[in-house]
Image (cartoon, rainbow, N blue to C red):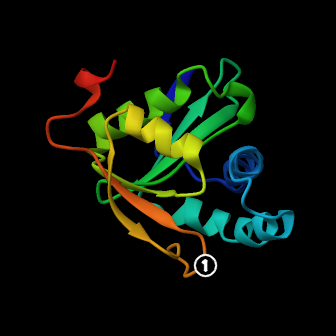
Amino acid sequence: MQLHDNPPRTPALVAQLVTIWAAAVRATHTFLSPAEVTAIQAYVPTALTQVPDLCVAVDDQQRPIGFMGVADHHLEMLFLDPTVRGRGLGRQLLTHGIVAYQVTSLTVNEQNPQARGFYEHLGFRVTERHAVDEQGQPYPVLTMVLPADAGPENFD
């Protein structure tokens, strides 16, 4: 597995990342209906092209298998192909985000306990709860912050 920082955001790459996003959301965001996933998916290409920093994880054949987006030290997105979950790729991406992009905060859906647990395991702590997401939809979100004394050197 390799990480590529800010690769050219070609239509082909964006399409591959949208496919990963959709598969990941179907696997982890069980609170969303199929229609809701489809509606949200319409915004993903724009988010991928507009996020300031994009890091793409690729396999040995250079196929994308996961990605993260960062803006102003805030993790905007982190999604993995469900077939590679549980292999440490999320940890590698997030660690890279902390080191390379100084990620210190993120927002996670409250209804996605696996993601919350993953971020808590890596040292992030909930600091705020909002009843609606960033688009004003009724999906509660949690703001999480990495304490100053936490970081990749402290990961177990």
Which is more toward the observer, 104 or 70?
A: 104
Residue 126, percent across and down? 34, 53
Which is more toward the observer, 13 or 36?
A: 36
Q: In terms of image quadrants, where is residue 142?
A: bottom left
In the image, taking residue 37 as reference, residue 114 lies left or right, namely: left
Q: Is residue 117 above or below residue 49?
A: above
Residue 66, percent across and down? 61, 37
Q: In terms of image quadrants, where is residue 98?
A: top left
The residue positioned 15% from the left and 42% from the top of the image is 148
Which quarter of the figure is the C terminus placed in? top left
Which is more toward the observer, 17 or 33?
A: 33
SS category of the residue bearing label 1: loop
In the image, taking residue 41 as reference, residue 49 lies left or right, namely: left
Q: Is residue 117 above or below residue 109?
A: above
Rate crowding at label 1 as few (under 14), some (14 to 19) or many (20 or more) other CA atoms within 10 Å.
few
Residue 129, percent across and down? 40, 66
Which quarter of the figure is the N terminus placed in? top right
Figure disc tally: 1
Point out the residue furthest to the left here: 149
In the image, taking residue 55 as reference, residue 106 lies left or right, namely: left
The residue positioned 69% from the left and 53% from the top of the image is 29
Residue on which the image places disc 1: 137
Which is more toward the observer, 108 or 18?
A: 108
What residue type is disc 1 on?
Gln
The residue positioned 71% from the left and 69% from the top of the image is 40
Residue 76, percent across and down? 46, 57
Point out the residue furthest to the right here: 34
The residue positioned 59% from the left and 53% from the top of the image is 9
